């Protein structure tokens, strides 16, 4: 099915000339069309049936005896779409789901006298719902059209009155506008986006634009409407200020790539320096695939070294998972073995790498090389058990990856809390996995590490790494949340036995971001959700504070986590990305913050005991008799019960379904639900393993 915007359309308005876009533009198609290459719907926000499977536009024109330009507006492009004019390849649409007003050169003699055909199509087998149209051609070359007016934007920090690193977004009708500028040592430029140190200089076609300056989620934004006319240079002063206090926390992105060293994406390592400073990342970890990169020298050369303390790391990219490791002693030390076929050898090699202390399990629910670490065929979700018998000796786990978002943003939060219940002290991580300048930009999700951040250019790497390993972090994708138990104890630290446990949580964000609710979890189970008052939702800085007495039993240790949520920003000055490997055609854009875990030694034995350890003690003491186990479980919560269920199943698979599961139904509602939960998760894994062995012929 091809869409042919008929010649009749062209005949009706053969030489439409409009003022905006500029006077030299000839509009060939004034509207957007829904195009999809495959039969499956990609997103439910698009119509069930597309207008066509590729975009074709026939129009009358005269041959061009010099280079001219083509404008196309594109929305939601994920796959590779190529642009052909009369069979000549003009390039590709931007692989970017954000809406873009793009320009492409038309080489001379590509247009012909009479009927011309523009065709935009993809050979991808994956369905891609896109919107495309608002096509125009120009009599002048692309660089001339985009340089009609010179614009200089200066962005100041309101408190210092000095230019500040920032991101400048340039929108036309709410879409990212192609710019007359190229990246250099002062600016990283993409359509509609410039990262710079405070001053940006670029061209625009005559017209009206919205210019927005910002610097990540801790700063305000300043937005202005600007109308520019040909040949009249304009200067615009914008100012931003810090709105979100994060004193005592360094903003870390543990997952940063470049095109230069990873070979894909679009950000060169030089552009990366400007994007890190522009998003306010103070502790970036360089993690290109299987290579050690040091930003130090380049950060100095480009004059941004004072804005962050760079750390050498590596994304150890294997066929059985990706692991981000840091700090690496120098860029010259040998890289860890990424070819091993088991985790034991991979982790041994990681920890044998000079100075490396941190190993993060990345994107556990994404498929790479046909392997998904937390896929049900390998992983029993309810108890965080690896079904291949592999030991997860990582000490951290990515739970928000802004470049590879999940359909259900809470799933990895639950996976992480399951790991804590299983006794693995994993630090939660927010990161960007950014390979790009603007598409999936750096630092949207980040990990705030508790440390001295008075001088962000001189962060003490050892103490930051040690605090990271201790779990003294709070992670954010947009929002920020802090948590305290009994007044002063924060994430990573332990509260001693006490008569009661009081939790205080605050949720923070800039004025341009909203928070709706905050949810408190004890041992992975939700104990309360607070809604923010409408007045506080858009407040800059601390939006709301909550407190409650925690329901903690004296017989069992616990951990407490707070999660804040709000609507994801869709506006293109800081847009949240759509899910990377979606599990649904529906999508609810969400910003969130997740605190590290605060530990409570409620049983007062001087150490923190995990749910799995309690479960083992209960089963051993009861000699695996389910009747006695149910009796003992009265003093424990669902986190312990689910591990007891697994132990009983492992002890005697035959009697579990026939007897034990039935017995649990006569027990307390908590035990009953935990046993059902375990059994459901176990069945899901069994089915997946049976399916996997059929597929691989094992
Ligand atoms: Zn990866
Ligand atoms: Zn990566």
Image (cartoon, rainbow, N blue to C red):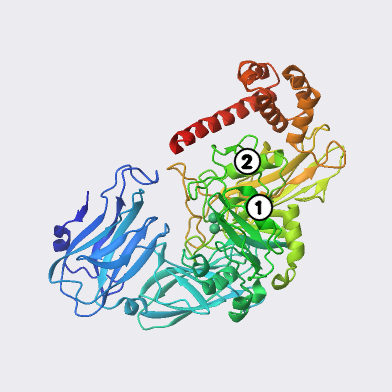
Where ligand 1 lies, by image quadrant? bottom right
Residue 645 image offset from top left, x and y in percent: 67, 26
Residue 637 image offset from top left, x and y in percent: 73, 30
The secondary structure type at the circle numbered 2 is helix
- Horizontally, residue 563 falls left or right of residue 318, namely right
Vertical placement of 231 versus 352: above or below? below
Q: What residue is disc 2 on?
A: 414
- Horizontally, residue 675 falls left or right of residue 233, namely right
* Label placed on residue 347: 1
Vertical placement of 64 versus 253: above or below? below
Q: What's the CA distance linking mark 2 and mark 1?
A: 24 Å
- Give the foreground label among 2 and 1: 1
User: Looking at the image, which is closer to me, 192 or 678?
Assistant: 678
The number of discs equals: 2
Q: Quarter-wise, where is residue 334 in the image?
A: bottom right
Callout 2: 10 Å neighbours few (<14), some, many (20+)? some
Residue 484 image offset from top left, x and y in percent: 77, 49
Q: Quarter-wise, where is residue 286 in the image?
A: bottom right
The secondary structure type at the circle numbered 1 is helix
């Amino acid at each position: 099915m091809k869409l042919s915007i008929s010649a009749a359309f062209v005949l009706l308005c053969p030489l439409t000339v409009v003022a905006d876009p500029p006077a030299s533009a000839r509009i060939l198609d004034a509207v957007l069309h829904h195009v999809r290459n495959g039969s499956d719907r990609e997103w439910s926000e698009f119509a069930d049936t597309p207008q066509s499977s590729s975009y074709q536009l026939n129009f009358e024109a005269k041959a061009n005896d010099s280079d001219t330009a083509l404008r196309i507006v594109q929305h939601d492009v994920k796959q590779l779409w190529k642009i052909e004019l009369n069979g000549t390849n003009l390039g590709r649409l931007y692989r970017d789901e954000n809406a873009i007003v793009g320009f492409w050169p038309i080489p001379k003699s590509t247009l012909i006298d009479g009927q011309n055909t523009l065709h935009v199509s993809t050979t991808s087998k994956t369905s891609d719902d896109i919107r495309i149209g608002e096509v125009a051609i120009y009599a002048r070359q692309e660089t001339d059209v985009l340089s009609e007016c010179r614009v200089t934007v200066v962005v100041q920090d309101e408190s210092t009155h000095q230019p500040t690193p920032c991101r400048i977004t340039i929108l036309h009708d709410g879409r990212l506008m192609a710019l007359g500028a190229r990246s250099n040592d002062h600016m990283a430029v993409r359509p509609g986006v410039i990262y710079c140190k405070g001053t940006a200089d670029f061209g625009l076609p005559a017209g009206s634009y919205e210019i927005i300056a910002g610097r990540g989620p801790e700063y305000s934004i300043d937005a202005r409407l600007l109308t520019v006319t040909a040949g009249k240079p304009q200067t615009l002063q914008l100012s931003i200020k810090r709105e979100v206090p994060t004193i005592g926390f360094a903003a870390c992105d543990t997952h940063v790539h470049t095109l230069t060293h990873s070979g894909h994406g679009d950000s060169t390592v030089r552009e990366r320096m400007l994007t890190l400073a522009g998003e306010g990342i103070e502790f970036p970890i360089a993690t290109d695939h299987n290579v050690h990169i040091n930003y130090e020298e380049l950060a100095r050369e480009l004059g941004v070294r004072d804005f962050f303390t760079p750390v050498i790391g590596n994304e150890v990219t294997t066929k059985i998972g990706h692991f981000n490791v840091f700090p690496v002693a120098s860029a010259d030390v040998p890289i860890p073995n990424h070819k091993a076929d088991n985790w034991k050898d991979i982790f041994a090699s990681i920890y044998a790498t000079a100075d490396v202390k941190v190993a993060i399990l990345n994107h556990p629910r994404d498929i790479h090389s046909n392997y998904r670490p937390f896929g049900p065929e390998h992983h029993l979700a309810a108890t965080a058990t690896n079904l291949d018998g592999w030991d997860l000796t990582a000490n951290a786990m990515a739970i928000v990856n802004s470049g590879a978002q999940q359909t259900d943003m809470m799933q990895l939060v639950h996976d992480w809390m399951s790991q804590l219940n299983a006794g693995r002290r994993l630090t939660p991580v927010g990161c960007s996995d950014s390979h790009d300048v603007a598409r999936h930009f750096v630092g949207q999700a980040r990990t705030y590490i508790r440390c001295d951040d008075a001088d962000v250019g001189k962060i003490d790497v050892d103490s930051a790494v040690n605090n990271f390993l201790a779990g003294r972090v709070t992670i954010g994708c947009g929002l920020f949340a802090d948590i305290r138990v009994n007044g002063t104890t924060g994430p990573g630290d332990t509260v001693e036995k006490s008569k009661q446990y009081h939790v205080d949580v605050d949720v923070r964000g800039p004025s341009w971001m909203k928070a709706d609710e905050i949810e408190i979890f004890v041992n992975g189970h939700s104990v309360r959700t607070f809604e923010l008052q409408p007045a506080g939702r858009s407040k800059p800085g601390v939006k709301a504070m909550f407190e409650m007495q925690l329901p903690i039993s004296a017989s069992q240790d616990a951990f407490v986590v707070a999660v804040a949520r709000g609507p994801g920003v869709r506006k293109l000055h800081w847009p949240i990305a759509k899910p990377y490997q979606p599990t649904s055609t529906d999508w609810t854009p969400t910003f969130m913050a997740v605190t590290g875990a605060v530990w409570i030694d409620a049983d007062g034995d001087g150490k923190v005991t995990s749910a799995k350890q309690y479960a083992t003690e209960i089963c051993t003491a009861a000699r695996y008799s389910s009747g006695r186990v149910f009796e003992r479980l009265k003093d424990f919560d669902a986190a312990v019960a689910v591990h007891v269920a697994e132990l009983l199943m492992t002890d005697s698979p035959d009697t579990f379904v026939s007897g034990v599961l039935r017995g649990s139904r006569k027990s307390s509602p908590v035990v009953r639900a935990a046993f059902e939960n375990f059994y459901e998760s176990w069945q899901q894994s069994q089915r997946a393993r049976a399916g996997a062995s059929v597929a691989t012929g094992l």
